Amino acid sequence: MVKTVSILGSTGSIGRQSIAVAQRLGIRVAALTASRQIELLERQARALKPDFVAVYDEQAARQFRVAVADTPIRVGSGLEGLVEAAVFSGSECVVTAVSGAVGLKPTLAAIAEKKRIALANKETLVCAGEIVMRRAAETGAEILPVDSEHSAIFQCLSGRGKGELKKILLTGSGGPFRGKKREELEGITPEQAVRHPNWSMGAKISVDSSTLMNKGLEFIEAMHLFAVRPEDIQVLIHPQSIIHSMVELVDGAVIAQLGAPDMGLPIQLALTYPERRDTPFERLDFWRMKDLHFEEPDLENMPCLRLAMDAAKTGGTAPCVMSAANEAAVQLFLQGRLGYNRIYDAAAGAIERLGVTAHPDLETILAADEAARAYVREAFSA
Ligand code: MG
């Protein structure tokens, strides 16, 4: 079990739950970062007494510095601040709970320092999976997935050799609009899109869950984390979110990980691994459990998943361009400046417009990310 941790994105949903897990287990939180929610960040900092806090937004960082001037806490800002928190010498492990591509550089910096990565930022692997996994293999940094599906797959594969895996069964609830036709989704508002039936999450990932883009990003994330091909992953809609994912082994045995839908467990396991500790979370009661359902994903009416699966096969900069364009489009949607169905149009349009570079280096990836965002801002913002 790790004894010290840096939490990047501490005011978000995963960040707050990570703090709760760390406090319960007696893990010291040595560094925190947030984007701009400085009132909550100040409460966290006063309670946890970290050595270092970084605020991504420069103006918010200035306010935060004034707010904690009476404490010995060192304050950083910008992407540099996030990187400093990620490589902070007082932390053994980094929880990467920031949303979006901003997580990439801090994660790579932490890998270079051989920190354990509790990876909750899926965009990092989507954009630069090849590079991230190669560098982790080089330095020996452990990457432990915090995404519930990937944590489940990781648990199912624990102790098994590479040749034993036949395929990954990546489950997803299908989101709040499961069974709806694309035309019916035309007027969906941000309030409707962020209301997820099973999981409580941040706004960006909730919208992604509703479009199934989240499942698509998880598809790409799984390819990199578990070194499998796109054809080795099958997406399975399972509305109850009790099975968090499964693996089929070469002999036909299927191993599943089940649990109540609570991110606390994957967060805790990433921090305690290889140990397991008691948790106060809800337990499954099989006597009271209703039926478990499974269906094929509806790629016709949820085209974001199909787009992501195609981008996974194409590889190169395609996943990064798609993810960045999606991120920019979701932002516009949440601001009420873009229609719900246009999110797909933006992500698909960006790949078509910008093209794909095979085996990109980090510079190429970051440039593709920026170009995709610029394309969406120009072509899609009302
Ligand atoms: Mg997930």
Image: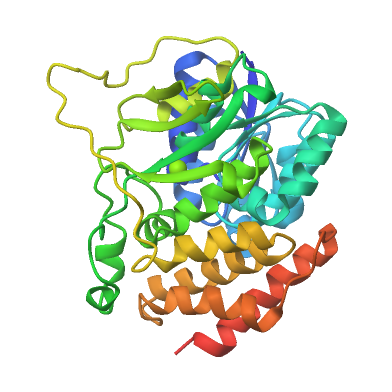
Quadrant of the rendered image containing residue 299: bottom left
Viewer-proximal residue, 235 or 175?
Answer: 235
Location of the N terminus by quadrant is top right
**Which residue appears at 58% of the width and 47% of the height?**
231
The picture quadrant for ligand 1 comes to: top left
Residue 193 locus on image (x, y percent)? 30, 63
Above or below for 142 versus 351: above
Residue 218 locus on image (x, y percent)? 52, 47
**Which residue appears at 50% of the width and 86% of the height?**
380
State whether residue 62 appears in this view.
Answer: no
Residue 152 locus on image (x, y percent)? 47, 28
Quadrant of the rendered image containing residue 378: bottom right
Above or below for 213 versus 268: below
Is residue 37 left or right of 117 when viewed as pictured?
Answer: left
Is residue 375 left or right of 22 when viewed as pictured?
Answer: right
Above or below for 283 versus 188: above
Quadrant of the rendered image containing residue 71: top right
**Which residue appears at 45% of the width and 22% of the height?**
255
Q: How many marks?
A: 0
**Which residue appears at 80% of the width and 29% of the height?**
114
Viewer-proximal residue, 168 or 36?
Answer: 168
Colouring style: rainbow
State whether residue 193 appears in this view.
Answer: yes
Residue 207 locus on image (x, y percent)? 38, 61
Is residue 342 left or right of 79 when viewed as pictured?
Answer: left
Location of the C terminus by quadrant is bottom left
Above or below for 120 versus 256: below
